[in-house]
Amino acid sequence: MTALVPLPNAWNVFNLQASPYWQDPLGDDDAVHPLHLFVGRTTELAALVDGLHAAGASSSRRAIAGAAGVGKTTLVERFKAAALRAGYLTGDAVVPILSGDTAEALFGRVLGAVYDMVLANRPGTLDHPAMRAGSWSM
Amino acid sequence: MNNLEHLGDADVRHAATPLRDLRDPMLMHPGLHFVLVGTVDAVRGAVFTHPQVRSTFSTVIDLPPLSTPGVLEVLQWRYTHLQLDLTHPWVAPVTDDAIAQLHTLFRGDLRGLLKALEDGVRPTIGLLERIRPLTHPELAQALWSVSQAAVSQALSGFVAGGYVVALPKEPGQAMRYALSGVSRVVFPSAERRGSARPVLRGSQPARGTTHVRYTTSALAAAIFVTSAAVAGAQQQPPTRLPAATATETVRTVTVQNDRGSAVTLFVDAGRVDRAIGTVAAGEIGTLALPAWATNGKRSVQVVARAARPRVVSQGRVDGTACRGTARVPHDERVRPDWRLPRRRRTFTLARRPTGRGAGTLASFRREPPMPHDRPIPVAVTAWRRPALTHGRSGSVVLVALFAAACAGSVNRADDGARRATATAQEVAVFEGPIWRLVEVRTAEGRVAPAVARGALRLVGGRLTGTTGCNNVMGEYTRDPADASRLRIGATAASMMACDDPRMAQEQHVLGALDRVTRAEREGNRLRLRDDAGVTWLAFEEEVPAPLVGTAWRVTNYDNGRRAVVSVRVGTTLTARFAADGTLAGSAGCNSYRAGYTRTGDTLTITPPAATRRACQEPEGVMEQEAAFLAALPRTEVLEIEGDRMTLRTVSGRLVAILVATTD
């Protein structure tokens, strides 16, 4: 019976722990792909953060357009981290807009994301009296 | 929100509709901040298709690709982050030059570049005589080494289809191929599941054209198609292909003007439309599309507008005979109320700010570039707005979650719906207007007068309205044989609680709607009856509040920082327009006075003068006052629907929203 030996990590020959060419966006709670590796985009980031502060307690809408793979998602992750530090709740989920979406379907998805966001950031929410069964109306 | 990346043009336009419908309950909901992310085409489509959505978004951030030094910096950080033995330096697996070349090839697609690097480096590890970075030729060899026979075989289908062209064979050289200008190649295994082989997107290929503009990068891309196609049977998803953008510069659109007057053609350029030329009455004109309008885009939108007298014509579906031409229909199709505001310089696929009647419109989808001497093929598709928005529908859970105040106003149904059904020439008499509730019959048979504003609108199969407390929405179907018959399907209502009289009215209205089978209109009155002829609901057509004499209260205003915000709690901003051309009101702390001029739908307001009191409370009242008074003179267009007035600039940007109050 042959003993199973793990294959040597090929990237070690470059004195690297793993492949530096991962394609996932960076994330703040991601030890392998941490957000502090974020580079550049200072103008865009400043515009986003300023817009958020300008909107304050009201609402805001921003749009980021760019070619595939150009770094849109990572920029959003970086922006979300900044917003989180500024005291905003941020959602982990990306809400997709799908072809054939109805307003109801999209609205439901956004509501779900907002709901998750509030629960994730305010752990005690479910214990709040207003959240108990049967007390939805005001 | 993300990934509009994989949506086609039609999908994008479709995706724009829920955004428009959810504008008020979701996008504008206080405390929510949205970031919409996607490809340039997708985001532009989603944001710019509907002016109501466009006006709420700040400038779209166009994210350019990272520069080559930026990419190198990204990688340096990654190497350092992953450094194994901190006492020894890391070795970059690939030379900077190779990365720069690949970066150019991938046109900024960082994800594709990284995938290629990973795919290229991994198989070569351990094969080099010593540890050193890979050079570009080595990387390319590792990535794209396929046999000539495999290339020819895999490409034969694409060549036959015209997506890829074989370049003239030169002695001693391998066969070379180039993309014919189709914008993008999509791999099923990576991006679309279900289909077995790579799909080349883009419609009609340009047969027989050779594209010398595609040199090395296109060649690499084409060969790469092969390698991916060959490898497609394996599980490994292929590396993404660089997006190939057409570099052709000469493109034209031919317009056949069937109208009795000249038309000017505009090309959509974001917030401002640019005129590209005029075609005289009855003439056929060929207009060049400027490079900036077509470069890097899969489609451009061209709209026709009468040169004078500013009447918009509607583009017609001409799907079969539309190659290279767009027909501008006869004057007989032009309705007198489709007039644009006089000073409006911009025009897109849009309703005009006042609402009734609007725009064009044809959408021109660009196909692969054609030889210089032929016009660009355009596929004209009619651009008809979908049935009806349902404004605040479904704010059920949000309301419950955030305990928002009872803010039931009738849904602002979309004017496009009115137009769409109007052109269908079979509008039922009850369709279109906003009907204000007068009386409702209770289940016990008692006739109860309306105690709170209830309203209903029936357009295009969709029912929207308010019961007096909650918003209601649903669907209805008409009987094709009998124009007064209708069947109301399931309705849904939001779930706010109101005072008892309103709740009672709501119960009556919802109960009565279930029994309705007929709609009969007499003048400005509408009765909804059952089969026995019993009237269950009686309405009157809602007349828009007059500008002069109405006490207007401001609910939202443009704060001057590209955002339209709600008036702060505890402050009241008012406006009262007098017949003598003066406007006066409270700006929250001080009183103000201004002059105004109204001509039809255009409204100009002079810079207001205000008293000089300073208020401390509530917080922000002075900032709000300054922003509101600064916003007012930006008004150029007004729109009144029911008891709601919207002030805008000609480009559709909101200045303020006001509601009529009873005092």
Image (tube, coloured by chain):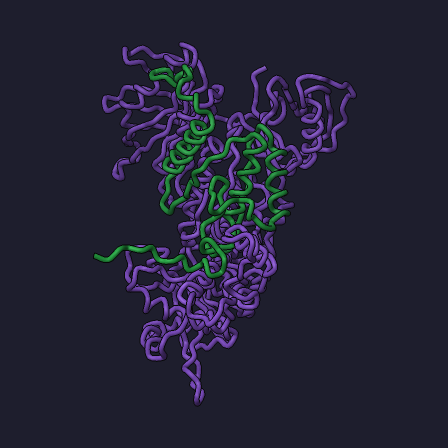
Chain colours: A green, B purple
The picture quadrant where one finds residue B577 is: top right
Total labels: the figure holds: 0
Q: Is residue B279 above or below residue B208?
A: above
Q: Quadrant of the C terminus of chain B?
A: top right
**Does the image show residue B492?**
yes
Q: Is residue A58 left or right of residue B183?
A: right
Q: Residue at x 46, y 35 (%)?
A: A91
Q: Nearer the viewer, residue B195 or B554?
A: B195
Residue found 41% across the figure and 76% down from its top: B165
Q: Residue furthest right?
A: B612
Residue B323 location, x and y as percent? Answer: 42, 66
Query: Would you place residue B449 above or below residue B170 in this image?
Result: above
Q: Is residue A91 above or below residue B444?
A: below
Q: Position of residue B300 (x, y in %)?
A: 50, 58
Task: Looking at the picture, tell me which residue is in the foreground, B243 or B371.
Answer: B243
Up the image or down, B228 lies above or below B662; here it is below
In the picture as drawn, the residue positioned furthest to the left comes out as A1
| Residue at 71%, 19% in the rendered image | B589
Location of residue A62 in the rendering, given as x and y in whole percent from the top left corner: 55, 41
User: Who's the residue at 63% across and 45% down the image?
Assistant: B342
Can residue B353 be spotted in the picture?
no
The image shows residue B452 at horizontal and vertical percentages of 45, 16
Q: B77 or B412: which is nearer to us?
A: B77
State the image quarter where residue B70 is shown: bottom right
Nearer to the camera, B639 or B507: B507
Q: Is residue B113 left or right of residue B186?
A: right
